[in-house]
Image (cartoon, rainbow, N blue to C red):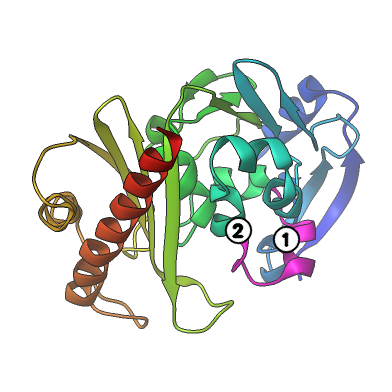
């Protein structure tokens, strides 16, 4: 367990940002990974009073606050209705319900973990992140940025008509993913993201063609780099990625037929 010399419940984002500029400070999200460390911190900054734990929806977008729990994300009717249940599928194997009740969207996204199901899913939805100082930027660009002392305020997902699907493979039900695959289709374009390669997710796009899904899926999978770790080899991951991308293409193809 980490220890902090001072605990501050921030009254504004500006106060939280100013406190966070010290390297010894730390922002408190769900603390699911932070509590496993043993580093001493100067100031622990709590954002829980800033009203950033909800999900707002209007005609054009969803706005997910950084303190929103993964459980709330999993159960949100609007998100799952619009994106075909992709958030239930994305979150249901993340450790367990108690964990998801505590872990936050901000902690999951800002950490940019290689094993992150959340980051992978957000990639194919072309989500944006709102940073307190950095403004609004695409999540694919954010994932490649260096870590800094800015604050992730919320995640924005636009209602742009895309259809999305997600799947992963784990060695056991609640383990970290061996491979995490997300796919979306919009206006003749595939949006594919693969995480746990074991690197963090990246996004690639490709036109939808008349080739069989098996061929298109292999071409997409071959554009990613895969490496070995204790959970599996790079070659095995590449093989799985091709299979799962084909299955996701078939799933989205069936949904398109149902909508006609």
Q: Give the quadrant of the C terminus.
A: top left
Helix, strand or loop at mark 1: helix
| Image side of residue 215 versus residue 107, left or right | left
Q: Which mark is residue 91?
A: 2
Image height of 163 relative to 219, above or below: above
Q: Position of residue 200 (x, y in %)?
A: 38, 54
Corner quadrant of residue 48: top right
Residue wearing tag 1: 100
Give, as a single range, the part of the protein colored magenta: 91-104
Mark 1 neighbour density, 10 Å: few (under 14) some (14–19) many (20 or more): many
Callout 1 touching callout 2 (CB < 8 Å): yes
Left or right: where does residue 30 sit relative to residue 12?
left
Determine crowd level at label 2: few under 14, some 14-19, many 20+ residues with C-alpha closer than 10 A: many
Q: CA distance from mark 1 to mark 2?
A: 8 Å
Residue at screen point 76% across, 48% down = 72
User: Picture coordinates of residue 253 (x, y %)?
Assistant: 32, 45
Residue 67 appears in which quarter of the rendering? top right
Mark sitting on residue 146: none
Picture coordinates of residue 147, whole percent (x, y): 49, 40
Q: Is residue 43 magenta?
A: no
For the N terminus, the quadrant is bottom right
Q: In percent of the image, x 27 and y 37: which residue is there?
A: 190
């Amino acid at each position: 367990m980490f220890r902090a010399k001072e605990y501050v419940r921030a009254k504004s984002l500006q106060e939280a940002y100013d406190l966070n500029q010290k390297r010894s400070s730390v922002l408190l999200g769900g603390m699911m990974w932070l509590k496993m460390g043993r580093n001493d911190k100067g100031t622990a900054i709590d954002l829980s009073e800033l009203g950033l734990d909800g999900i707002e929806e209007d005609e054009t977008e969803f706005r997910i606050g950084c303190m929103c729990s993964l459980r709330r994300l999993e159960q949100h009717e609007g998100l799952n209705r619009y994106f075909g249940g992709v958030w239930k599928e994305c979150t249901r194997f993340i450790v367990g319900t108690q964990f998801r009740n505590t872990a936050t969207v901000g902690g999951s996204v800002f950490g940019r973990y290689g094993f992150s199901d959340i980051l992978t899913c957000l990639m194919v939805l072309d989500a944006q992140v709102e940073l307190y100082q950095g403004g609004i930027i695409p999540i694919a660009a954010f994932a490649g940025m260096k870590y800094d002392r800015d604050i992730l305020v919320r995640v924005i997902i636009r209602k742009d008509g895309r259809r999305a699907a997600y799947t992963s493979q784990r060695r056991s039900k609640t383990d970290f993913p061996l491979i995490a695959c997300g796919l979306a289709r919009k206006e003749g374009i595939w949006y594919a993201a693969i995480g746990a390669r074991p690197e963090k997710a990246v996004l690639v796009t490709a036109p939808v063609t008349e080739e069989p899904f098996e061929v298109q899926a292999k071409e997409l999978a071959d554009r990613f780099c895969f490496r070995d770790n204790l959970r599996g080899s790079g070659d095995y991951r590449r093989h799985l990625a091709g299979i799962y991308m084909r299955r996701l293409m078939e799933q989205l193809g069936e949904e398109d037929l149902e909508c006609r």
